[in-house]
Image: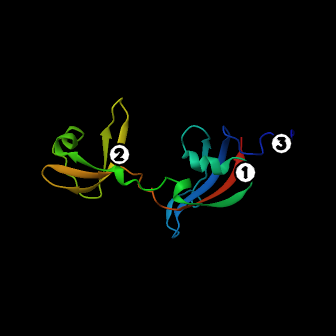
Amino acid sequence: MSNLPHSIVTETAYLTLHYRLASVDGNDIVSTFADNPATLQLGNGQLAPFLEACLIGLAEGARQTFELPPERAFGSRNPELVRPVSRKTLDENSGAGEQYAVGDMVEFAAPGGGKFAGVLREIDSDTAVFDFNHPLAGQALTFEVEIIGIL
């Protein structure tokens, strides 16, 4: 094995690959198979950690499909992440005169300078209700990958 140090994907591998993330009903969420492959460095946040974990140990040239239940993907839906937000808070995080519709993704400033986003579920003159779950939370996913090269 010592003569093949770069033929297996490691936690910090720099690699070229095709990948496809799809819902269990087969609808592509993202796919590179029809276009140019992706080149990325693992551990840099370019892929979600649970997707990177699937790649560890794969050999150059491998093509594999992973069925990921919600617990191994973006997690289960958490009802506590569906929260009311005052119109005042919404206005503070909006551009002047911005209008919202149910289904819109809205970004909020987090304490400490980060950002987080939620999907608008309902809105009236006083309150807006946002779902801060990841849009793919609660969904099983299919992750297909072809390792083209490990650099």
Q: Quadrant of residue 34?
A: bottom right
Q: Are marks 2 and 1 in contact (CB under 8 Å)?
A: no
* Residue marked by disc 3: 4
Circle 2 SS class = strand
Horizontal and vertical percent position of residue 56: 69, 47
* Residue marked by disc 1: 58
Upstream in sequence: badge 2 or badge 3? 3
Distance of mark 1 from mark 3, alpha carbons?
13 Å
Between 87 and 71, which is closer to the camera in this rendering?
Answer: 71
Name, please, the residue furthest toward the bottom.
Answer: 25
Q: Quadrant of the C terminus?
A: top right
Q: Residue at x 48, y 61 (%)?
A: 139
Upstream in sequence: badge 2 or badge 1? 1
Distance of mark 2 from mark 1, alpha carbons?
34 Å
Upstream in sequence: badge 1 or badge 3? 3
Q: Quadrant of the N terminus?
A: top right
Horizontal and vertical percent position of residue 127: 18, 50
Horizontal and vertical percent position of residue 83: 29, 49
Q: Residue at x 73, y 51 (%)?
A: 58
* Residue marked by disc 2: 117
Q: Quadrant of residue 68?
A: bottom right
Q: Badge 1: few (under 14), some or many (20 or more) residues near its Cα, within 10 Å? A: some
Q: Badge 3: few (under 14), some or many (20 or more) residues near its Cα, within 10 Å? A: few
| 38 with respect to 126 (left or right) | right
User: Label 1 sits on what residue type?
Assistant: Leu
Between 31 and 125, which is closer to the camera in this rendering?
Answer: 125
